[in-house]
Amino acid sequence: MFISNAYAASAAPVGDLMSFLPIVFIFALFYFMLIRPQMKQAKLQKAMIEALKAGDEVATAGGVIGKVTKVGDNYVSIEIAANTVVNVQKHTVQTMLPPGTIKSI
């Protein structure tokens, strides 16, 4: 009498493209904001490691700064002080420093 009857709404069409649009948008956002820049950075890091040569000044992931004396297939010899040479794995070389950086420290 005072309360009207409530009826169920009609079902939405199954497979509607608009329901998948947010998922596609989120995937595109992740690709352009996270995946693509990370792949670009990895490519630059690999190119820098392949271009290492004796005489380059580098910093390793552990914070060791020195001059490259010998480059092998998997290892790099770095002179960190006079007559002090350490061998590190190539992938631990983090940054190539500008020439003369070690003398300015």
Image (cartoon, rainbow, N blue to C red):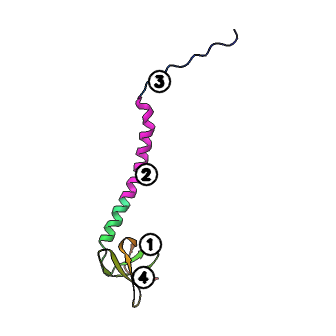
Q: Give the image quarter of residue 49.
A: bottom left
Find the distance from the CA under tag 2 to the CA under tag 1. 25 Å
Which amino acid type is shown beneath numbered disc 2? Met
Residue 8 visible from this viewpoint: yes
Mark-to-mark CA distance, 3 and 1? 55 Å
**Disc on the earlier residue, 2 or 1:** 2
Whole-angstrom CA distance, mark 1 to mark 4, is 17 Å
Classify mark 1: residues with Cα within 10 Å, few (<14), some (14-19) or many (20+): few
Q: Locate residue 69: give its quadrant.
A: bottom left
Return the residue found at the far top.
1
| Amino acid on which the number 3 mark rests in the picture | Ala
Residue 94 in sight here = no
The residues colored magenta run 15-39
**Percent of width and height locating residue 48:** 33, 69
Magenta stretch prevailing secondary structure: helix
Spatial separation of the CA atoms under disc 2 and disc 3: 33 Å
Q: Which mark is residue 102?
A: 4
Q: What distance separates the C-alpha of mark 4 from that of mark 3?
A: 68 Å
- Say what secondary structure mark 2 lies in: helix
Instruction: Mark 2 vs mark 4: give the one in front.
Output: 2
Asked whether the beta carbons under mark 2 and mark 4 sit within 8 Å of each other, the answer is no
Q: Position of residue 56 (x, y in %)?
A: 34, 79
Name above or below for residue 17 compared with residue 48: above
Looking at the image, which is closer to me, 88 or 57?
88
- Marks 1/4 in contact by CB < 8 Å: the verdict is no
Q: Which mark is residue 61?
A: 1
Does 16 sit above or below residue 83? Answer: above
Residue 94: x %, y % from top left: 41, 71
Residue to which mark 3 is pinned: 12
Residue under circle 2? 33
Tag 4 secondary structure: helix
Tag 3 secondary structure = loop
